[in-house]
Image (tube, rainbow, N blue to C red):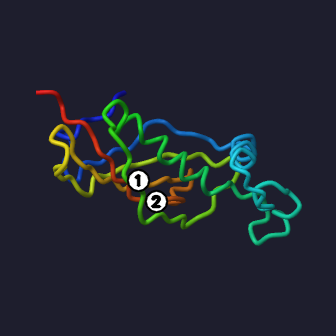
Amino acid sequence: MAGRFYDEWRVGDRIEHEIRRTVTETDNLLFSTMTHNPQPLHLDVEAAKASEFGQILVNGTFTFALMVGLSVGDTTLGTLVANLGYDKLVMPKPVFIGDTMRATSEVIAVRESKSRPDAGLVTFTHELVNQRDEIVCRCERSALLKRRAA
């Protein structure tokens, strides 16, 4: 399950990543505490119950990181030079403990690198979807990828 080289991508290529992941309380707790995020909606059951959501909300930066992580094996594993940026990040629906996530990726742009003849830029739209088929996270990721050796 290795990523593709720059030369192997075309605009419109779409992948439904096979790996799925159910978010656990431990995921949310560890990520929130490791990143020093004290938001009560992520850590305090009573505060979360009193919110409009009525339960713990999963840390949004964990949600984003999970989406990217689920995509790496099929997109950039072993071919990445560098991630150049993440744009248009949105989280249209909340994620709760026990939700099962799956990701999709679509290539929206491919272009030659002006400074690196051995690499090129690929821009993906990544989406994270829950078990109710709701999009919970979306972003564009620009990646500098190696070319296949000649």
Q: Position of residue 16 (x, y in %)?
A: 38, 44
**Which residue sits furthest left?**
150
The amino acid type, in three-letter code, at marker 1 is His
Q: Residues within 10 Å of mark 1 (few under 14, many from 20)?
A: many
Residue for point 27% across, 41% down? 145
Disc number for residue 93: none
Q: Is residue 99 left or right of residue 44?
A: left
Residue at the disc numbered 2: 138
Residue at 36% x, 49% y: name it.
105
Residue type, mark 2 in image: Arg
User: How many angstroms separate mark 1 from mark 2 (CA)?
Assistant: 6 Å
Vertical placement of residue 54 versus 129, above or below: below
Check disc 1 and report the residue beneath it.
126
Q: Is residue 127 left or right of residue 106?
A: right
Q: Position of residue 61 (x, y in %)?
A: 60, 54
Of 84 and 4, nearer the camera is 84
Quadrant position of residue 56: bottom right
Instruction: Where is residue 71? Give x, y as percent.
Output: 42, 42
Residue at point 33%, 48% (across, down): 143
Tell me whether the residue at label 1 lies in contact with that at label 2, contact meaning CB atoms closer than 8 angstroms: yes
